Amino acid sequence: MDLRELALNNNPERHPWELARIKVIKQLLKDFIPEMKKQDSCILDMGCGDIFLIENISEDYQEASFLGVDIEFNKEVLDILESRIGNKNIKVFNSQKGVQEVRKKPVDVVFLFDVIEHIEDEITFLKELNGSSLIDENTKYVITVPAFQSLFMQHDHFLGHFRRYTNKTLKNRLEAAGMTVSKTGYFFFSLIIYRSLELLKERLSKKQEAQGIGNWDKGKTLSRIMYSILIMDFFIFRLLAMIGIKTPGLSNYAICQKSA
């Protein structure tokens, strides 16, 4: 979760979107990133937020090591996270430079989960990351971003988004940064309907407020229902994509690597 949306240890209840996204990402890793199963694999999570996501992913890859980076981490936050992590296979840093001081060879996988939309010039950012000692031609990227600029609303401003993407625009920007893209796709079709209604409500109302998912407090029953809907949504439309029926979604992803 983005640190804008959550004060650490403030709300133990997680938004069903966040929980469902973990399931989606785990499936994407299983489908496209077999390198994660290597005993000595190293995964770099850039913009890791409160590390809830990599904590969950690391449970399935206990032989791998995870390096979480977020420039919003101060000493107090780092102390809280390191205390929470304990002896897990995760280390946290507040800069890429900090990672390079302890990691002297390229990582196997880079996560950029809902990160590059926060960066005004994401192409330059990706070029600089590709040029670092942490990346080589074998390093795989797994990237997720919010989809469709037409659905840009106040919540995007609240989160500090500069843009939303389509598969085409995401692929174009990644290639401009020197990437070879092997796969793109969408997920969470049902949320497009919800987002469209929210956007309509926002445009008809003079109220211009936005809140993050960190204040989710709708109860366990509604959370389970929404989570189940999102999981069914993902797997149904994944099956349709396998037979050539492609549909949009509120998020899209890319699997890519630095071009040779």
Image: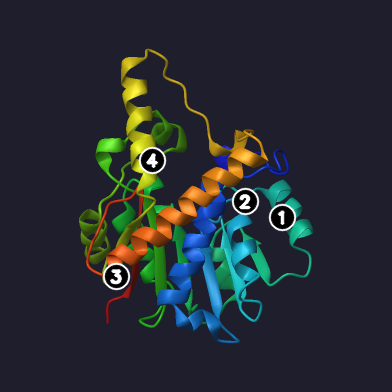
Separation (CA) of disc 1 from disc 2: 8 Å
Residue for point 38% across, 59% down: 236
Instruction: Look at label 1 and name its amino acid.
Output: Leu
Instruction: Look at label 4 and name its amino acid.
Output: His
Q: Which residue is mark 3?
A: 242
Q: Position of residue 231 (x, y in %)?
A: 48, 55
Q: Is residue 8 toward the left or the right of residue 16 in the image? A: right
The numbered mark, 3 or 1, whose residue comes first in the sequence reads 1
Q: Which residue is mark 4?
A: 161
Which mark lies nearer to you, 4 or 3? 3
Q: Which residue is mark 2?
A: 50
Q: Which residue is mark 1?
A: 81
Q: Are marks 4 and 3 in contact (CB under 8 Å)?
A: no
Separation (CA) of disc 3 from disc 1: 40 Å
The numbered mark, 1 or 2, whose residue comes first in the sequence reads 2
Vertical side of 142 occupied by 7: above or below:
above
Separation (CA) of disc 2 from disc 3: 34 Å
Q: Is residue 161 toward the left or the right of residue 217 in the image? A: left
Q: Quadrant of the C terminus?
A: bottom left
Q: Are marks 1 and 2 in contact (CB under 8 Å)?
A: yes
In front: 236, or 147?
236
